[in-house]
């Protein structure tokens, strides 16, 4: 069977053999961690199959083997062995930024927030399709391999805003958040406005702003279930009773109301998810919000066991509680995980471009 690396080299050109000690060591690490036969020093880590999970593991291994202090952002900014070896050979410390330039340009910069477990590489097709003049930046949820020091989304938003202002000290700014990134940019947008900075665009994709506040008898998660059931139409209520309600009863009986439904193995990602699940704010965003979401759940009957399926139908109502302007709905026929894949990414790009002109 044809190896991935063989297809890659035929597509990209000549295979460059590792020469220096650092290049050879990195090549050994990449081959082992990516489970491939050979790596050239000009091969792109992500083209070879690198993911957000392998980024964390590979950076930890590099730091242990080289005694270095590389951050996760390093492998995004220097995605080849040649580039990474040069960085290791010149310094073991680096300036850390949670923001990566995706595309140069002029005008209002667009900062794109990925889901909590992803990296800006998921926006590659968006960047390729984008024909506007604005520069594009991707956000890294954590630049540290072992720690996520922020205790609240508000704290994290202040950190991100400082990083944004180091790139562009004054507005206007454009913000786009996908999945849990939508919740992050709501707080970023609110804080920017509180500091009298102009936000030209606030756009969210396929997520909701927050759980409802905790009540006297029910946790936030339980109140969310009640909010969903009382807001959805009769057809979805029937599906909820047959598919989702048993889970609701189970939570009530066990009393484990705050337990996350998503299982996460990496500590930094657990912390990111935890602060977003505890996010609360009484402030509102002053202006219109662009809400992009899918037409229906992912299709498989098992999806009806998930709360997201039912929230999907009430997204506009949920977001309106946090916005003083209009919630402008843009529905795309796709699945939650496919907004930045073709053909949906072309529609997403066109929508964003139309509001940045």
Image (spheres, rainbow, N blue to C red):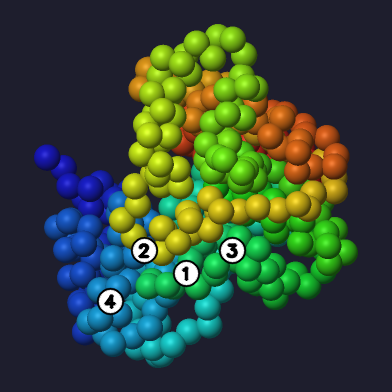
Q: Earlier in the sequence, mark 3 or mark 2?
A: 3
Residue identified by numbered label 1:
148
Closer to the camera in the image, 69 or 101: 69
Which structural element holds mark 4?
Answer: helix
Q: Position of residue 203 (x, y in %)?
A: 70, 43
- 191, above or below 220, in the image: below
The residue tagged with tag 2: helix, strand or loop? helix
> Residue 353, position in %: x, y?
73, 41
Tag nearer the camera, 1 or 3: 3
| Cα gap from disc 1 to disc 3, whole angstroms | 11 Å
Mark 2 highlights which residue?
267
Front position among marks 4 and 2:
2
Say which of 295 and 195 sits in front: 195
Using the image as rendered, state which of residue 114 and residue 304 is in the foreground: 304
Q: Work out whether mark 4 precedes mark 3 in sequence or the reverse, and give the earlier one.
A: 4
Nearer the N terminus, badge 4 or badge 2? 4
Q: CA distance from mark 4 to mark 3?
A: 30 Å
- Which residue carries the number 4 mark? 62
Report crowding for label 4: few under 14, some 14 to 19, many 20 or more residues within 10 A (C-alpha). Answer: some
Q: Earlier in the sequence, mark 1 or mark 4?
A: 4
Label 4 to label 2, Cα distance in Å?
19 Å
Q: Dot 3 corresponds to which residue? A: 152
| Image height of 316 relative to 54, above or below | above
Q: Nearer the viewer, mark 3 or mark 2?
A: 3
Q: Residue at x 48, y 56 (%)?
A: 274
Instruction: Kindly report the distance in space between the C-alpha atoms of the residues bearing marks 3 and 2.
Output: 16 Å
Q: Is residue 278 left or right of residue 356?
A: left
């Amino acid at each position: 069977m044809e190896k991935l690396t063989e297809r890659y080299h035929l597509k990209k050109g000549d295979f460059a053999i590792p020469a220096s000690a650092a290049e050879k060591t990195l090549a050994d690490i990449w081959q082992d961690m990516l489970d491939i036969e050979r790596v050239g020093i000009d091969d792109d880590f992500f083209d070879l199959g690198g993911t957000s999970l392998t980024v964390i593991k590979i950076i930890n291994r590099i730091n242990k083997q080289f005694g270095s202090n590389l951050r996760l952002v390093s492998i995004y900014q220097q995605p080849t062995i040649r580039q990474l070896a040069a960085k290791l050979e010149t310094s073991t410390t680096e300036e850390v930024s949670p923001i990566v330039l995706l595309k140069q340009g002029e005008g209002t910069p667009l900062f794109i927030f990925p889901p909590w477990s992803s990296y800006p590489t998921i926006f590659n097709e968006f960047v390729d399709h984008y024909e506007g003049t604005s520069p594009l930046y991707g956000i890294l949820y954590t630049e540290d391999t072992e720690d996520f020091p922020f205790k609240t989304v508000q704290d994290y938003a202040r950190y991100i805003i400082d990083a944004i202002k180091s790139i562009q000290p004054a507005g206007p700014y454009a913000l786009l958040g996908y999945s849990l990134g939508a919740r992050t940019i709501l707080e970023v947008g609110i804080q920017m406005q509180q500091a009298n900075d102009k936000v030209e665009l606030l756009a969210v994709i396929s997520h909701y702003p927050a759980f409802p506040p905790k009540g006297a008898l029910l946790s936030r998660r339980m109140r969310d279930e009640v909010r969903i059931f009382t807001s959805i139409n009769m057809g979805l209520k029937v599906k909820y009773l047959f598919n989702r309600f048993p889970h609701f009863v189970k939570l009530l009986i066990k009393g484990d109301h705050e337990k996350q439904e998503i299982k996460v193995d990496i500590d930094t990602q657990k912390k990111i998810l935890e602060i977003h699940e505890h996010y609360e704010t009484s402030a509102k965003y002053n202006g219109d919000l662009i809400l992009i979401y899918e037409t229906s759940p992912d299709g498989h009957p098992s999806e009806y066991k998930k709360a997201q399926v039912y929230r999907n139908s009430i997204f506009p109502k949920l977001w309106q509680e946090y916005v003083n302007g209009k919630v402008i709905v843009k529905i795309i026929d796709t699945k939650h995980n496919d907004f930045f894949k073709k053909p949906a990414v072309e529609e997403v790009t066109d929508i964003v471009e139309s509001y940045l002109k």
